[in-house]
Image (cartoon, rainbow, N blue to C red):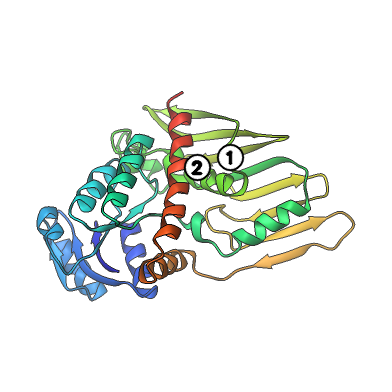
Amino acid sequence: MRVAILGVSNIARSSAKAMIEAGMQIIAILSRDIAKAEAFKVELGAMKAYDDYELLLEDEDIDTVYVGLPNSLHYEYAKKALMHKKNVLLEKPFTLRYSEALELKNLAVARHLYLFETITTLYQPLLADLHEDIAKIMPLHSVILNFSKYSAKYDEFLEGKLPNVFSEKMGGGAFYDLNIYNLHLAYDLFGRPKKAVYEANYQRAIDTSGVMTLSYQGFFVSAIAGKDAQSKPFALFSGEKGYIYLDGAPSIIKGYELHLKDQEPIVKKDDTNAYTNEFKVMERIFKKGLYKTHLDVLERSLQVMKVADELLSK
């Protein structure tokens, strides 16, 4: 993939470096501030810098656009890229509405373009192991997914400022920033829930923390996310034949412990760089022309977006 990076935010910067490690080529940088685009271009060894999106989209050296902009801009910028026949790497959350996600999918399919959501949960090597090990502790009765961390921007928010991550207009909040990872993991492991409810602490119209409850046959998933409190992220799967404990954010499964009845714990670890790995998978799918595989991954993003839409519209 020959990629244009939209934005110079922290996530755009870390993603661009992971893309290079994954074998992608960074062609151009876009920023409203051309000086920032030029500086980032030099840092990455890219070829071009732009402050005009329309001009960038006319560049035939670029076949893929990475959208690392605020959440509320994902749909608009991805749609423009697809209309200009560019593949899209779309930062999580995919969009803010299921209808927007579905429209983007239809545009991509009609033009035989690749459209990926860049979310680490989708591409982790230990996810297959976790599926197998959950089967060993069945029947399952409860799952807790906790991805909470005190935001670096929360103090600014308390002072009356409105950084993007706490702006309703920009699609901020704890759900879209953190709980979307929990939802992706739950969907991958257990599929669509029978019922889904989201209850949150709101400050100035934005959810600074909240709990998502997903109901399945015989068990519940309690997914916690917060940007307003200190916490240790973890995941706990509790079943009749044992339990699984994941020490760390559910967004990146670096390892977990499988505890079966009357047996020594089994520890599994993975040192793969999750950010580099997700782009390696995308690059492999693209290079090998595995369009059907791409559609399968894309459909999962859409189904997660559908559940999210239902949760937040209640």
**Count of marks, rendered view:** 2
Mark 1 in CB contact with mark 2 (< 8 angstroms): yes
Nearer to me, 65 or 104: 104
Task: For label 2, count other residues whose C-alpha is less than 10 Å away and answer few (under 14), some (14-19) or many (20+).
Answer: many
Judged from the image, the secondary structure of the residue bearing numbered disc 2 is helix
Q: Which mark is residue 277?
A: none
Q: Which residue is depicted at the point 41% across and 28% down?
A: 203
Measure the C-alpha gap from mark 1 to mark 2. 7 Å
Q: Position of residue 295 (x, y in %)?
A: 42, 54
Would you say residue 89 is visible in this rendering? yes
| Residue at which label 2 appears | 179
Judged from the image, the secondary structure of the residue bearing numbered disc 1 is strand
Would you say residue 150 is visible in this rendering? no
Nearer to me, 55 or 113: 113
Q: Amino acid at mark 1?
A: Ala
Rendered position, 134 above or below 267:
above
Q: Which residue is depicted at the point 53% across and 70% down?
A: 272
Q: Position of residue 297 (x, y in %)?
A: 46, 54
Quadrant of the frame with the N terminus: bottom left
Q: Is residue 274 left or right of residue 239?
A: left
Rendered position, 120 above or below 160:
below
Rendered position, 85 above or below 215:
below
Q: Quadrant of residue 50?
A: bottom left
Q: Which residue is depicted at the point 31% across and 45% down?
A: 106
Q: Quadrant of residue 247?
A: bottom right
Task: For label 1, count other residues whose C-alpha is less than 10 Å away and answer few (under 14), some (14-19) or many (20+).
Answer: many
Q: Amino acid at mark 2?
A: Asn
Q: Which residue is depicted at the point 31% across and 59% down?
A: 12
Q: Position of residue 202 (x, y in %)?
A: 44, 28
Q: Position of residue 301 (x, y in %)?
A: 44, 47
| Residue at which label 1 appears | 223
